[in-house]
């Protein structure tokens, strides 16, 4: 068994390992979906690592590289172990192997998210020195089960623009977006996103950033003085109209943001599960 960088590994080999490692997961990704996910999350094969058994991948960690809270950061965009190699501690060995390489590239922070019900993974990351920084809800609902009637409120209109033209408004947000929902992630894969803005005259009232192929609502925010007027509902309605997936998902909404949770629950988009955001200084 040898741990080494994925810098010289072709995508088909990586995809086959990814497919086998996550074969028992409810949600499966095809090649196109995996490529889109990796692009959005800043995947850097040269700073990603795998354990190889001969020429075959036994376990891997795919790292995204960028900035988080102003710090050069590595983000775990996918860690998996093929079934026949589980129980050997390979994920921890790969992480420890990666640390000097990440440090040498100027990375000072490692960031990940882990499902709260995956107690084994949470325990491993805690033993590796990770600390929980935030708790996130995630939401998934079929389009035909979402309840969202009504019209665009009087005095408001909607407009669309490309993600490359979009700039978020920090004063609209109740929490900082996670890695995969950040403006950096949106710009990495700008062609995959649609931005819908709500305006009152010339004033921006709110916006939604949406990935139609995946049904992913990446950001949804309304200015404080425009809230409780139906603006968020109008934005959601337009995103649903543009959706090319049979479901909608909202990933990594802070548990502490009760207003957002209640808004989605009122649309019959209930909490599907929770994640921990965890970090470790390198």
Image: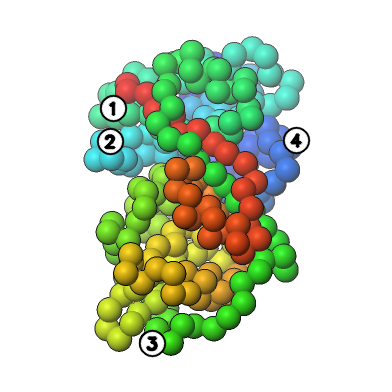
Residue 41: x percent and y percent?
Answer: 44, 46
Task: Count neighbours of disc 2 (C-alpha within 10 A) and say few if under 14, some if 14 to 19, many if 20 or more.
Answer: some
Q: Is residue 162 above or below residue 47?
A: below
**Residue 214 in view:** no
**Residue tagged 4:** 24
**Residue tagged 3:** 155
Q: Is residue 93 above or below residue 174?
A: above
Mark 2 vs 4, N-terminal side: 4
Identify the mark at residue 108; answer none if there is no mark: 1
Residue 138: x percent and y percent?
Answer: 57, 47
**Residue 179 in view:** yes
Q: Is residue 152 left or right of residue 109?
A: right
Find out whether the residues at labels 2 and 1 contact each other: C-beta distance under 8 Å.
yes
| Distance of label 1 from label 3 (alpha carbons) | 48 Å
| Distance of label 2 from label 4 (alpha carbons) | 33 Å
Q: Secondary structure at mark 3?
A: loop
Quadrant in the rendering for residue 149: bottom right
**Residue tagged 2:** 72
């Amino acid at each position: 068994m040898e741990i080494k960088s994925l810098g010289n590994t072709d995508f088909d080999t990586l995809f086959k390992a990814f497919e086998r490692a996550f074969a028992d997961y409810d949600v499966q990704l095809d090649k196109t979906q995996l490529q889109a996910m990796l692009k959005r999350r800043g995947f850097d094969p040269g700073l990603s690592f795998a354990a190889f058994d001969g020429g075959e991948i036994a376990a891997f960690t795919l790292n995204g590289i960028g900035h988080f809270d102003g710090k050069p950061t590595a983000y775990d965009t996918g860690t998996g172990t093929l079934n026949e190699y589980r129980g050997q501690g390979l994920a921890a060995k790969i992480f420890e192997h990666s640390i000097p390489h990440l440090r040498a590239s100027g990375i000072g922070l490692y960031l990940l998210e882990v499902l709260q019900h995956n107690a084994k993974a949470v325990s491993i990351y805690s033993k590796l020195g990770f600390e929980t920084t935030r708790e996130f809800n995630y939401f998934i609902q079929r389009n035909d089960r979402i309840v969202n009637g009504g019209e665009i409120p009087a005095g408001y209109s909607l407009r669309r623009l490309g993600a490359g033209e979009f700039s978020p408004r920090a004063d609209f947000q109740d929490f900082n977006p996670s890695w995969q929902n950040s403006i950096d992630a949106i710009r990495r894969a700008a062609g995959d996103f649609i931005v819908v803005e709500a305006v009152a005259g010339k004033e921006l009232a709110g916006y939604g950033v949406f990935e139609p192929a995946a049904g992913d609502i990446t950001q949804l925010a309304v200015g404080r003085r425009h809230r409780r007027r139906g603006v968020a509902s109008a934005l959601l309605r337009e995103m649903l109209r543009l959706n090319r997936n049979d479901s909608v998902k909202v990933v990594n909404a802070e548990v502490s943001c009760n207003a957002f949770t209640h808004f989605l629950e009122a649309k019959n988009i209930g909490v599907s599960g929770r994640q921990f955001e965890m970090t470790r200084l390198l």
